[in-house]
Image (spheres, helix red, strand yellow):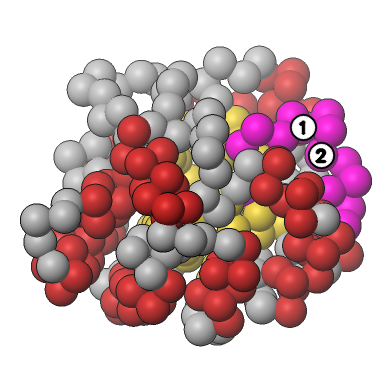
Amino acid sequence: MKKLVGYLTPKLPDSQFTIDLALALFESGMDSLELGVPFSDPVADGAAIELAGLKAIKNGFVFDDILRVSDNLRGKDLLWMGYMNSFFRRGFDRVAQEAASLGVSGLLIPDMPHEESGRCAGVLEQKDIALIEFIAPTTPKERILANLKNARKFIYLVAYNGITGADRGEDESIRGCLENIRAATETPVFVGFGVNRKSAKRRVLGADGVIVGSAFVRPLLDDNVGSGEKMRRVCEEAKAIKEIINE
């Protein structure tokens, strides 16, 4: 069965809502959850996730909030996603220790070049935590082969060049890139960026799963509806996508 990885911004509007929504999403078919560390300059993220991060920061987000949410989701497959500055400011050794103590299985750092990831990957490996590798359709085959020799948990295959949530109508070819990844590693490949119920079927072709962020975050930004309706909309999207990718 193909997997669904979801993304949520903690503290939107508060940590307890994030916990309740995450549990509901796991009940709705989500397999793994990325908890995003809000950041003021999220270079890989589109408007929805950027706004979500800014709202969370205004709501008083501190790193301890991601620890609280993770602690309340023990036993679920959790990942932390954030930018280099957030983790290094806290101290990477400390982050690794905290993640390990809470059962977090992987970290995603989209602005960390592979060439600079060696020490971080080593620290995480000692704690049995994967540093997830990002691959784009434009990544040369030689670089894919070099970067993915020791890849763990899954590969994050970016569906197109750009930022998250673009929901592009065209289907940029990633088949060749998938073939190159398969030649480099047996690690599962999940496709992210612009994945929703309209695009999921074509995005998942040849892959092992999809990563959904903006499609889950957008309903949470609608201030005209209450928490219950927001949760219903997000869970409905998750159920639909999980069904579509496994048709």
Tag 2 secondary structure: loop
- State the SS at label 1: helix
How many labels were placed on the picture? Answer: 2
Q: Which mark is residue 238?
A: none
Name above or below for residue 74 compared with residue 184.
Answer: below
The residue under the point 34% across, 33% down is: 47
Q: Is residue 63 above or below residue 87?
A: below
Where residue 160 appears, as percent x and y from the top left, is: 42, 23
Circle 2: residue type: Ser
Q: Residue 173 appears at what percent x and percent y? A: 39, 20
Residue type marked 1: His
Residue 67 placement, left or right of 234 = right
Look at mark 2 in the image and give the residue it sits on: 117
Q: Quadrant of the N terminus?
A: bottom left
Q: How far apart, in angstroms, are the residues tagged by discs 2 and 1?
A: 5 Å
The quadrant in which the C terminus is found is bottom left
Residue carrying label 1:
114
Which quarter of the figure has residue 9?
A: bottom left
Q: Residue 42: say if magenta.
A: no
State the residue at coordinates (54%, 33%). 41
Closest to the observer, 40 or 28: 40
Measured from the top left, where is residue 84 in percent x and y?
70, 41
Q: Position of residue 62 (x, y in %)?
A: 58, 62
For the record, the magenta segment spans 108-123
